[in-house]
């Protein structure tokens, strides 16, 4: 099973190696703009309620939303492999367990998400942000990447067209990017919306990263929630892959 | 040995009248394919050949029936991985990983079949030479011609030394030289002891390659026999003529019977030896054609 997971991961790593420079450069654009526009620009006039600078508040949010986007979109080519190229059939025919394919793909997406996060952390320090990186901080980032890679995998299995994959970005990821405690506290939202938003995995990630980064106490329940999301999406993804054999 | 017992596959096929309608792709197929045999599945488009191969290779679940490989039942999880290890598949569509090079595509496949690094390296080099693609090992698969892609598909399927090879329309849309090259490869594989199951709608391909042929039409098995027996069973000679611009023919056991029949016709006709195409048209219904 581990060897099969490694094989699936190896494939994505090989593709990433071909495009590493382009990948790194393209991943710098969005965080740079966020840091310039919201950190330097708008951020100078904003004073977070908990004290500190807005850029310190902002960086964990950017890390959370960026790792979500990168991990999700790293898995979306699986949709083309299933619907258009049919190259996924090579894995269905091969003597590997379906779960190995899912885990291998998710781990490869986690790697991309973490490379992208490393770029943001470097840029954030260059922009003068202050936050501490601990093993728990990295664990939360990894969990966040894995959850959204799993969601991306399930979407790639269930959705019929490339347009529908794009709609997941538009209707799910984009609203979460702005509302899940990334740019402002969820306490600013109306109660009903706040409760719904606080159930979402990205909100837990934002608050965990912000808390750990600033050295504050964090709720381990949020870590457990992320872990529960991960188990659920892996289960759904594994089932979806098995069901490809209609 | 592959045993296929009463295999059936239906797909949902909604229409205006019936939302629960089904399309029967394969209907009660039973066959036995012996070890070391080149076995052909012959039929027109929509006959159920590809669906049969997809069920045999575990890409599609049968609706009913069972498949056994040397007594191991497809579907049982413990046996499924062992069966997958012994089969190789050359699909109809060129399903390469578009983001990898020729060599990387082969390496991925070798890794999926748990080959060691040393085994992978030597086997990939050997097979690339076998299919005459050594010069493009570092090229992206997108850059290959159609014939090169077909040969690469065969190399990929052979990497793990499969005991059973499935070829689904392996020479479709290829020029005659490449087709001959692929036929040569299939013969070499069979000589090495592999069981080969090939689907085709090229009659001459079945005639050239197969020890036995199963003729399918509309999901059903029409007949199974050797190409030679099919021909001798239905008649070794064909009289062919045109009737109102439509081709017609009749099969005869002897040339004398055929000549006698020509004498009764009031139009020009010719006699030739029967081929598998005549058998196919005779068995699948003259209006079906190919």
Image (tube, rainbow, N blue to C red):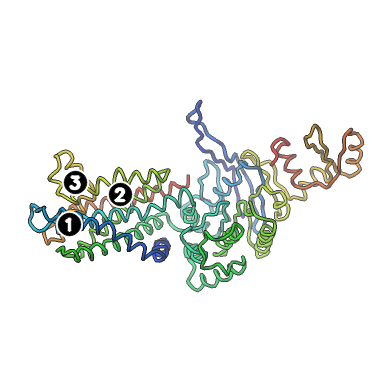
The residue that mark 1 highlights is A39
Please, which chain is the residue tagged with disc 2 on?
A
Of labels 2 and 1, earlier in sequence is 1
Quick check: B284 above or below A217? above
Picture quadrant where residue B221 is located: top right
Q: Residue at x 24, y 56 (%)?
A: A33
Subunit of label 3: A
Which dot marks residue A198? 3
Callout 1 environment at 10 Å: few (<14), some (14 to 19), or many (20+)?
Answer: many
Which one is earlier in the sequence, the residue at label 2 or at label 3?
3
Q: CA distance from mark 2 to mark 1?
A: 35 Å
- Of tags 2 and 1, the one toward the viewer is 1
- Disc 1 chain ID: A
Is there one chain holding both mark 2 and mark 1?
A: yes
**Residue located farthest toward the front when viewing the structure as drawn:** A41
Q: Nearer the viewer, residue B81 or A222?
A: A222
Q: Can you tell which mark lies on residue A83?
A: none
| Residue A89, placed above or below residue B140 | above
Quadrant (top left/top right/bottom left/bottom right) for the N terminus of chain B:
bottom right
Whole-percent x, y for residue A60 in the image: 19, 57
Secondary structure under tag 3 reads helix
For label 2, the residue is A232
Q: CA distance from mark 1 to mark 3?
A: 24 Å
Quadrant of the snapshot with the C terminus of chain B: top right
Q: Residues within 10 Å of mark 3 (few under 14, many from 20)?
A: some
**Residue A85 appears left or right of B283:** left
Where does residue A38 sit, x and y in percent of width and height? Answer: 18, 54
Of A42 and A224, which appears nearest the observer? A42
């Amino acid at each position: 099973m581990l060897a099969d997971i490694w094989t699936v991961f190896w494939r994505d790593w090989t593709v990433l190696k071909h495009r590493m420079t382009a990948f790194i450069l393209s991943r710098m654009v969005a965080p740079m703009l966020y840091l310039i526009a919201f950190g330097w620009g708008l951020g100078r006039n904003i004073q977070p309620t908990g004290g500190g600078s807005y850029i310190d508040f902002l960086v964990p949010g950017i890390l959370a939303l960026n790792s979500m986007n990168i991990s999700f979109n790293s898995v979306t080519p699986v949709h083309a492999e299933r619907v258009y190229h049919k190259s996924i059939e090579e894995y269905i025919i091969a003597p590997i367990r379906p779960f190995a394919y899912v885990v291998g793909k998710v781990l490869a997406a986690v790697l991309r998400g973490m490379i992208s996060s490393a770029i943001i952390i470097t840029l954030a320090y260059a922009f003068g942000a202050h936050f501490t990186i601990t093993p728990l901080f990295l664990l939360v980032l990894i969990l966040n990447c894995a959850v959204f890679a799993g969601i991306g995998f399930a979407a790639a299995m269930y959705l019929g067209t490339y347009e529908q994959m794009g709609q997941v970005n538009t209707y799910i990821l984009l609203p979460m990017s702005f509302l899940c405690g990334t740019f402002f506290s969820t306490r600013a939202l109306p109660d009903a919306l706040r409760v719904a938003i606080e159930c979402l995995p990205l909100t837990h990630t934002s608050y965990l990263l912000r808390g750990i980064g600033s050295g504050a106490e964090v709720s381990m329940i949020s870590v457990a929630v992320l872990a529960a999301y991960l188990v659920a999406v892996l289960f759904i993804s594994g089932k979806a892959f098995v069901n490809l054999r209609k | 040995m592959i045993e296929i017992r009463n295999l059936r596959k239906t797909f949902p096929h909604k229409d205006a009248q019936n939302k629960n309608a089904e399309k029967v792709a394969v209907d009660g197929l039973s066959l036995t394919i012996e070890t070391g045999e080149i076995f052909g599945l012959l039929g027109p488009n929509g006959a159920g050949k590809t669906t049969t191969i997809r069920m045999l290779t575990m890409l599609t679940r049968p609706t009913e029936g069972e498949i056994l490989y040397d007594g191991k039942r497809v579907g049982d999880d413990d046996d499924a991985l062992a069966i997958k290890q012994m089969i190789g598949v050359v699909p109809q569509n060129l399903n390469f990983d578009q983001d990898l090079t020729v060599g990387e595509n082969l390496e991925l496949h070798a890794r999926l079949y748990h080959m060691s690094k040393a085994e992978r390296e030597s086997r990939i080099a050997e097979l690339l030479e076998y299919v005459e693609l050594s010069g493009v090992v570092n090229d992206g698969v997108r850059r290959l011609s159609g014939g090169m892609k077909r040969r690469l598909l065969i190399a990929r399927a052979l990497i793990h030394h499969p005991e059973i090879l499935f070829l689904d329309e392996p020479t479709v849309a290829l020029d005659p030289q490449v087709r001959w090259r692929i036929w040569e490869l299939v013969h070499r594989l069979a000589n090495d002891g592999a069981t080969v199951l090939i689907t085709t709608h090229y009659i001459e391909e079945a005639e050239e390659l197969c020890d036995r042929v199963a003729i399918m039409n509309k999901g059903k098995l029409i007949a199974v026999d050797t190409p030679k027996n099919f021909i001798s069973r239905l008649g070794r000679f064909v009289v062919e003529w045109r009737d109102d611009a439509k081709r017609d023919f009749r099969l005869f056991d002897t040339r004398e019977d055929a000549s006698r029949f020509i004498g009764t016709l009031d139009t020009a006709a010719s006699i030739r030896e029967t081929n598998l195409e005549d058998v196919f048209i005779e068995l699948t219904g003259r209006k079906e054609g190919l």
